[in-house]
Image (tube, rainbow, N blue to C red):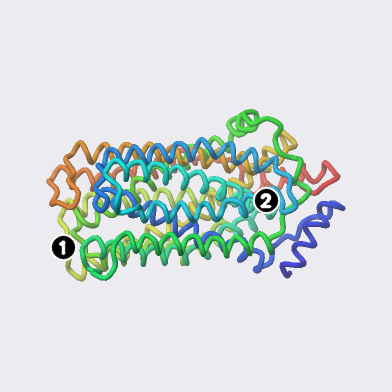
Amino acid sequence: MTARQDAAAMDEVANTGVPLPARLSRSILVYYALPSIGLHFSFMLMGLYFFKFATDVLLVAPAIMGLLIAGGRFWDGLSDPIAGYLSDRTRSRLGRRRSWLALSVLPFGLSVLMLWSPPPALSNAGIVAWLGLGLFLFYTTYTALAVPYGALGAELSEDYHDRTRIFAYRQGVGAIGLLCAVFAYYLLLETERGGLESLSARELGQGIGLFAAATLCVTVAFVVARVPERTDYQDRGPERLFGAFGDVLRNPHARRLLVVQCAHFFSVAALSLGSAFFFQYVMNAPSWMAATLVGCFAGGTVFAIPVWVALSQRFGKHHCWRFALVVVGSLYLSVFFAMEAGFTASPSFLAAAIVFTTLVGAFQSSNFVLSHSLQADVIDFDEVVTDQRKEGAYLATWSFAEKCSAAVAAGLIGLLLELVGYEPGASQGESTRLAILVLMSLVPAACHFLGALVLRGYALDEREHARIRGVLSGRGGRSR
């Protein structure tokens, strides 16, 4: 089925109640996935290197930078429910999701440029103020873009397994952005260490911002022009802001997913913010090795996507996700003992590190694909109870919880580095190296084991979802 035929099918649903096509066309899936290139690029670089860029290049104290990032993430989380509610209630010729994408994409790209290339003439206090404002703009515009974008994906299909395809395509196409981020990460490391004499960190930052802005503008244009949006869902959003999020918290399946995602994103934030410190001060890894390992992680997430799609169809989404959480937790636990035994720059150790990071990426891929698909199923359960479509409210609530977890992680990491005596660009003491090692091993291991424990007993499987779809279809009128 072509994109034009998909759009016609969407319109027919709105007017006659004819069911949606069981499987979306490949063209629609690709068009929807395109903005993930710029989003993955921007957010991966922010997580991987911006903290270290601010401390080691811009010379902002770790505790101050941690507080700035924590404040930005808290605001990011607080603004999510507002964006989700407004997106659910929006009426526009472009639809309630695509209009938000069109309005927010350019300001988001400009905020990336602002963060990575502050004016050289700023004083220390001026840099802190500039970064604080830049983080506020970055997270505000990211919310306005990402929440409606995620909600659009959640409502594209009603099919239990087709939803997994939607987010598998999004993650797969987004891998282009991940690979670009890995290359930019390598260039940033080389610039900091003096390996690129013809390029300054601020000049490279300008390139990063311009690439993010151009990529997002072009790819969002494809979504606005070619991805259909269900017009029958307009005017079916929640009446009250806080009532909508009360419904989310009263949903037993949603509560369980919230806890798992909070634990997961706390670990993601810890790993992202700590990775550059880990590679330099614990492993003493050269730039090419750090970029290679990050690239292996990104490659693992991509190549495992079709595997998780196939396994979820046979064993169930939540069973596969829970298994992956246990495996990833075990892998991170092994890091602590491996690094305590001593790191050597031998070919065999490098080969083992490559295999390890690829495996971590492969199993982490389950979260990026299966969790979003499960969230879409939970929204159907809510519709049975409330007779409303609240994709925006649900995606915003999950995002709020995730970002608050990341904010807490950022604040604690900055404080931890300050307490253990971290000195930017200098040789670190044993207590600092141990703290970074714990941050990159024991903390994510505990988070993943907790997530697997909470996911035990999750009840909204394929059979239950089929029953829910039957109830909604039996209500008559629109296909829901």
Give the class, few, some or many, for how many residues have Cα within 10 Å of label 2's Cα (few <14, many ≥20).
many
| Marker count (numbered) | 2
Q: Nearer the viewer, mark 1 or mark 2?
A: 2
Left-right relation of 407 to 377 = left
**Which residue position is annotated with label 1?**
344
Where is residue 443? Give x, y as percent.
31, 42
Judge whether 379 appears above or below 49 on screen: above
Q: On the rendered structure, is 132 left or right of 341?
A: right
Nearest the eye: 474 or 387: 387
Q: Quadrant of the N terminus?
A: bottom right
Which image quadrant for residue 439?
top left
Q: Residue furthest front?
A: 121
State left or right for residue 200 relative to residue 297: left
Q: Is residue 223 above or below residue 318?
A: below
Pick the front one: 72 or 178: 72
Determine whether 62 is above or below 169 in the image. Answer: above
Q: Amino acid at mark 2?
A: Glu
The tag on residue 155 is: 2
Instruction: Decide if residue 457 is in sight here.
Output: no
Mark 1 vs 2, N-terminal side:
2
- In depth, the one of 302 and 5 nearer the eye is 5
User: CA gap, disc 1 to disc 2?
Assistant: 50 Å
Q: Residue at x 75, y 67 (%)?
A: 4
Identity, as a three-letter code, of the amino acid under mark 1: Thr
Q: What is the quadrant of residue 210 in the picture? A: bottom left
Q: Is residue 142 visible?
A: yes
What is the x, y in percent for residue 159? 69, 54
The crowd level at tag 1 (other Cα within 10 Å; few <14, some 14-19, many 20+) is few
- Helix or strand or loop: what does disc 1 sit on? loop
Q: Which mark is residue 289?
A: none
